Image (spheres, grey):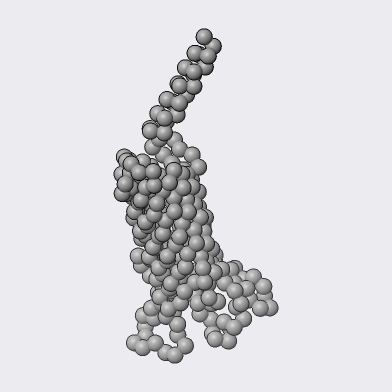
């Protein structure tokens, strides 16, 4: 009799777990990424670009970590929300554009950014154990602070984005695979508008290629 009661309890728990998995509509987790950025600067007041003016420059690399929420709509589609913190190692003084003499004293520059995105994900083969997906998102990123290492002064923190607009709209598209709780993807991000600085009549737009790994930590109905 005791054995029958134990078996019945185990069966009930298994049914409950299966039901919970089937009815889980929310997934919450953490993600990390590694990428590289490419920047293009426009000089709006100049018909031709003088020697020494740099229009195109890359970051050395970009690393980030964040959290995400995924709202399952059905087997094929879900809504996404992401919040990320990013560090970008930059060529010295590309945003600040000091004089050539002043730039030599800046030996290192790190940009700290925050990003938020919302979008829609499509699972191409939802019944497979390894699911392929594509998604598109809209969002914004913000230059929180730029930290420069300046010879003779140490760390110099700039919080006004060197006079450029700090917040910028962004669009992105991703493709990847998901197995159980783990998702691996590649993402392309692009500014939807240039951040502008009035005093120099310049504007900068960026595009980014990122590799991402995300892990679902818990699910909820």
Q: Which quadrant, please, contains the C terminus?
A: top left
- Corner quadrant of residue 46: bottom left
Residue farthest top in this picture:
1
Placement of 178 over or under 167, stated as above or below: above
Q: Residue 184's x, y, as percent?
A: 44, 53
Please name the residue shown 58% across and 86% down the image: 101
- Count of all numbered marks drawn on residues in the image: 0
Examine the rendered structure and indicate whether residue 76 appears above or below residue 208: above
**Could you tell me which residue is drawn at 45 percent across and 21 percent down?**
12
Q: Is residue 7 left or right of residue 202?
A: right
Q: Nearer the viewer, residue 56 or 44?
A: 56
The vertical placement of 94 against 75, above or below, is below
Task: Using the image, determine if residue 161 lies above or below residue 200.
Answer: above
**Can the viewer see residue 201 in this picture?**
no
Query: Residue 168 appears at what percent x and percent y?
Result: 41, 63
Q: Looking at the image, which is closer to me, 44 or 77?
A: 77
Residue 164 x/y as whole percent: 45, 70
Residue shown at 50%/62% (left/top)? 34
Outermost residue toward the right in this view: 152
- Please say whether residue 62 is visible from this viewpoint: yes
Horizontal arrangement in the rendering, residue 151 relative to residue 165 (left or right): right
Instruction: Name the residue located 49 percent from the left edge and 52 percent from the top edge.
Output: 31
Indicate the position of residue 132 as horizontal and vertical percent values.
Answer: 35, 51
């Amino acid at each position: 009799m005791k054995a029958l009661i134990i078996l019945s309890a185990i069966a009930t728990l298994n049914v409950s777990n299966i039901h919970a998995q089937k009815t889980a509509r929310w997934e919450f987790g953490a993600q990390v990424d590694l990428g590289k950025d490419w920047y293009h600067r426009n000089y709006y007041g100049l018909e031709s670009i003088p020697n020494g003016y740099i229009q195109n420059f890359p970051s050395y690399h970009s690393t980030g970590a964040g959290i995400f929420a995924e709202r399952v709509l059905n087997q094929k589609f879900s809504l996404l929300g992401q919040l990320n913190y990013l560090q970008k190692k930059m060529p010295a003084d590309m945003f600040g554009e000091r004089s050539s003499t002043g730039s030599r004293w800046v030996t290192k520059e790190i940009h700290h950014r925050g990003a938020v995105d919302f979008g829609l994900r499509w699972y191409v083969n939802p019944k497979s154990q390894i699911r392929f997906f594509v998604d598109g998102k809209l969002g914004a990123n913000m230059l929180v602070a730029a930290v420069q290492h300046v010879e003779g002064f140490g760390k110099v923190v700039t919080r006004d984005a060197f006079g450029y607009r700090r917040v910028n709209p962004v669009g992105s598209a991703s493709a990847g695979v998901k197995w159980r709780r783990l998702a691996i993807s590649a993402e392309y991000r692009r500014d939807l508008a240039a951040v502008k600085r009035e005093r120099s009549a310049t504007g900068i737009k960026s595009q980014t290629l990122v590799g991402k790994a995300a892990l679902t930590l818990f699910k909820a109905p």
